[in-house]
Image: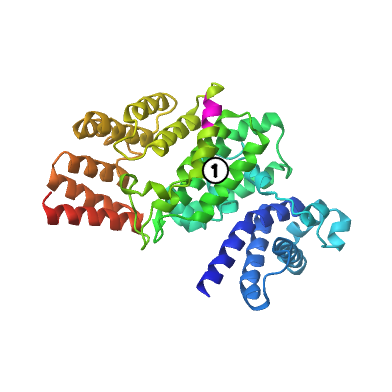
């Protein structure tokens, strides 16, 4: 029963952005469409377990959402202005007949169009990311607020304003032109990577990962790569996702506990994803496309090709991170560079590099900085300081598996006196 419920939830989460895209394409009203789709999802969650999943679940959801939206517009006089807008935008024949159009019957997936619309230049990058995570990624407003470290009310206002800006811009629901698409591509890739990262390592909650999010980000990036196969950054991002996702099965133990990279059973890594990712990044770099995503994919490839941590080509990873740092001032890149340097030159060298991050407001209070410092202090033999930073990191993380892992590391260090 629990498995069936989980499958139902996965199905609805997968279909939600596709249904939202189809309803927006028809009614052109972002907020109203989102409300209607939410009602359709609730109806499905109530009816499908009793009556069975319909033969065309996506079409069922689109029809229910469309009917709810039309009923709502007609029934509520207080929303007469929106009714007039909807009526003016929908062709007369569609107002009378709610049957699916040919595209919907054929299973047209509007998710990619929805993704580009959420990354409209009228929005700030932060608003575009928040709206995409809401509309395409399926995260709740509370989840997005936690990811951005802002109050939920603040995030709700930000998302509401973003939807209104899109509504006011009058942007058509269609893929942008080549020129417009190029302008939005950087934001789109950034958003896809954030969704993947949140799915691969959930920032909060009882599960280490959310496969629905990482899987959806991978699917969308594949779609984008299909449209832009010659773009080095798109290919690099797809390779990075594949090479990272390949380690998924080895990252958790039987109870869902976190297993760090150096302790993973590499026989569990997905060889097919590694082969595909390496082929992709090799072809990309050979064309001279040396941007942030191909570089990160190259680093992931070096890890995936190594039989164990000790046999990893750490000097090459250090060199790749130093090139990567030239593209942007990203504190997470600086942090990972310090780890790689410590593997080559020893923990004291890594600890020295971490000092520059203490003054960086973007990372100074982040649990990863404490966790990395604890690990390097442990390697340097500074037991008490390592325990203190493991405990500090455990208090700052909102992920239960990460918290438990850090507490276990501190307890083992204290008990063994190592």
Residue sticking out furthest to the left: 417
Q: Name the residue under label 1.
A: 192
- Whether 284 is among the magenta residues is yes
- Which residue extends farthest right? 93
Q: Residue 131: in sight, yes or no? A: no
Q: State the extent of the magenta-drawn residues as a range.
A: 281-285
Relative placement, left or right, of 192 versus 173 is: left
Residue 179 in the image, given as x and y percentages of width and height:
68, 28
Q: Residue 304: which quarter of the image? A: top left
Expressed as whole percent of the image width and height from the top left, the position of residue 406 reads: 26, 53
Residue occupying the point 13% across, 57% down: 415
Q: In this view, does 160 lie to the left or right of 110?
A: left
Res. 100 image quadrant: bottom right
| Residue 159 located left or right of residue 399 | right
Disc 1 residue crowd, few under 14, some 14–19, many 20+, Cα 10 Å: many
- Would you say the magenta stretch is mainly helix, strand or loop? helix
Tell me if residue 271 comes above or below residue 88 in the rendering: above
Label 1, secondary structure: give it.
Answer: helix
Q: Residue visible at 59% across and 67% down?
A: 8
């Amino acid at each position: 029963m629990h498995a069936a419920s989980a499958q139902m939830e996965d199905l609805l989460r997968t279909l939600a952005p596709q249904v939202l895209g189809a309803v927006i394409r028809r009614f052109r009203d972002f907020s109203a469409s989102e409300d209607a789709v939410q009602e359709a999802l609730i109806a499905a969650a109530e009816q499908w377990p009793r009556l069975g999943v319909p033969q065309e679940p996506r079409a069922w959801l689109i029809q229910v959402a469309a009917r709810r939206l039309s009923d709502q517009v007609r029934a509520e006089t207080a929303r007469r202005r929106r009714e007039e807008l909807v009526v003016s935008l929908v062709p007369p024949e569609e107002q009378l007949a709610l049957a699916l159009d040919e595209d919907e019957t054929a299973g047209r997936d509007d998710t990619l169009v929805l993704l580009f619309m959420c990354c409209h230049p009228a929005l700030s990058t932060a608003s575009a990311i928040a709206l995409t995570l809401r509309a395409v990624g399926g995260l709740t407003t509370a989840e997005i607020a936690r990811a951005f470290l802002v109050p939920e009310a603040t995030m709700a206002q930000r998302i509401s304003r973003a939807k209104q800006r899109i509504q006011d811009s009058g942007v058509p629901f269609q893929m942008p032109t080549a020129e417009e698409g190029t302008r939005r591509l950087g934001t789109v890739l950034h958003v896809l990577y954030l969704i993947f990262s949140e799915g691969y390592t959930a920032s909060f909650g009882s599960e280490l990962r959310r496969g629905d999010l990482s899987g959806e980000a991978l699917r969308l990036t594949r779609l984008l790569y299909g449209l832009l196969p010659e773009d080095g950054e798109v290919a690099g991002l797809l390779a990075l996702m594949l090479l990272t996702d390949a380690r998924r099965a080895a990252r958790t133990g039987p109870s869902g506990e976190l297993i760090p990279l150096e302790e993973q059973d590499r026989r569990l890594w997905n060889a097919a994803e590694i082969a595909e990712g390496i082929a992709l990044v090799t072809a990309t770099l050979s064309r001279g496309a040396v941007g942030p995503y191909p570089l990160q994919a190259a680093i992931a490839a070096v890890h995936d090709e190594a039989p164990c941590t000790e046999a990893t080509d750490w000097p090459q990873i250090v060199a790749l991170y130093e090139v990567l740092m030239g593209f942007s001032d990203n504190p997470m890149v600086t942090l990972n560079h310090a780890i790689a340097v410590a593997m080559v030159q020893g923990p004291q060298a890594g600890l020295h590099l971490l000092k520059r991050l203490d003054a960086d407001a973007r990372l100074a209070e982040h649990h990863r900085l404490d966790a990395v410092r604890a690990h390097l202090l442990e390697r340097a033999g500074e037991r008490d300081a390592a325990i203190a930073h493991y405990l500090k990191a455990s208090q700052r993380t909102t992920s239960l598996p990460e918290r438990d892992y850090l507490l276990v590391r501190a307890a083992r260090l204290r008990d063994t006196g190592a």
